[in-house]
Amino acid sequence: MKTETSLDDLIYFLSKLPGLGPRSAQRMVLFLLKKKETHFEPLKGLMDAVLSEMKVCPLCGNYDVITPCHICQDTKRSQTTLCVVPDVSDIWALERSPIYHGQYFALGGLLSALDGITPENLNIQKLKNRLDSSPIEEVIFALPLTVDGQTTLHYLIESLKTYPVKLTTLAHGMPVGGELDFQDEGTIQTAFKARTEL
Amino acid sequence: MIKWTDIGLLLSNKRLGENKFISSIFTKEHGKTLAITYGKKPQFEPFSLVQTHFTAKTENQLGIFKLESLTPFSLFFLEDRKRLQVLLMSCFLMDRLLPQGETFSLFFEKTIDFASHLEEENWLKFYILWEIDLLSNLGFGLNLSCCALGGDVDTLCFVSPKTGCAVSFEKGKPWAGKLLPLPSFFSHPEEDASKEDLLAGLALTAYFLQREALNNTSIPFDRKSLV
């Protein structure tokens, strides 16, 4: 890291954030400097507050400033369905859609023998503890339809088969608005396998 | 400027920064090659057959791949734990063991042939025979054609863990505890393989792969669960 002043340091650290590079980081810092009262100071305060208050939910692994997180504390949500997702970003993605109103659990990644990620690196034991301690009746696996996602799914099915819960997974196949001509062979094959009677 | 086009099997994608990957591809005419692919997520999954367009400024520079899908073998078996595991295991072995830039055209064709047998009932037998081929291509070929202690070809039952040579039942009987069992489908590939034969075959290839090629590190897959 070759920087000279705190301003350079700020640009350098911002440039390392996802979606940003040195130029966009520089533009961002210039914008903040010009809007010191309206943007820079409130942002600084918020970042300090989140940094000091941020907690990892012990139940689902979500980030929040309260513990358990606001999703786990919400009594209006179903307490009997648990949606297992790879990461916190997937919880936030599913929360954008109004379709699901149950509990979540973030695995903390996906198994990958090629990258050396083993079951010990994921929160699988925490998932078992959660199933032991809560009235879950259905576990919904919302894992990606990739080699790593499905390897993880197979492992979880094997690991959880002794639990008295219904195991389900999201449907796979044609995307909404998708045309056959633009789909790859894997998508078409999966869609055919999962076809439904009308 | 170096440019070539070839067909290849994608072996792995290792993230490089936010929207780049170093992809390892086993190509038919150019052997295993590493190069950069662009995208926020990998373009294709491991064990996908792809049309590979490679460009690099110099021989020593990491080049760039542009890929087009031909046959996404692994996507066909996403719902089958065992077959998916075998495809991943073969990717792991090829990625780890094949030297870069050395051509293995015949072995490439055999790899595609093994993948096309995956739909069959005896698919695991083809995989084990593929591992024997891999060992042979790496320079650790097993001599399973006749008994190393007398030339017998009919009653081959064991393999010497030291030399990798086959041993007949009669000659090997006194040392049976020290020798590795040789499944019958190794010498008669057209025969169906029993569960015991498959387990013995997996143990045999794992033994030599780990000792000769992987420097005594274990293969990170549960091979027994495949049978």
Image (spheres, rainbow, N blue to C red):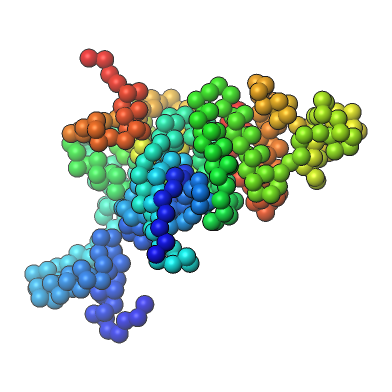
Q: Residue at x 67, y 54 (%)?
A: B215
x and y percent of residue B68 in the render?
35, 44
x and y percent of residue B46 in the render?
45, 43
Is residue B1 rendered to the left or right of residue A116? Answer: left
Between B109 and A127, the residue placed more toward the observer is B109
x and y percent of residue B50 in the render?
41, 43
Q: Residue at x 19, y 64 (%)?
A: A46
Q: Quadrant of the N terminus of chain B?
A: bottom left
Q: Quadrant of the C terminus of chain B?
A: top right
Between A51 and B226, the residue placed more toward the observer is B226
x and y percent of residue B222 in the render?
59, 38
Is residue B177 rendered to the left or right of residue A87? Answer: right
Can the viewer see residue A138? no
Relative height, residue A93 to residue B154 (above, below) = below
Relative height, residue B58 to residue B95 (above, below) = below
Q: Residue at x 47, y 56 (%)?
A: B34
Relative height, residue A119 to residue A12 (above, below) = above
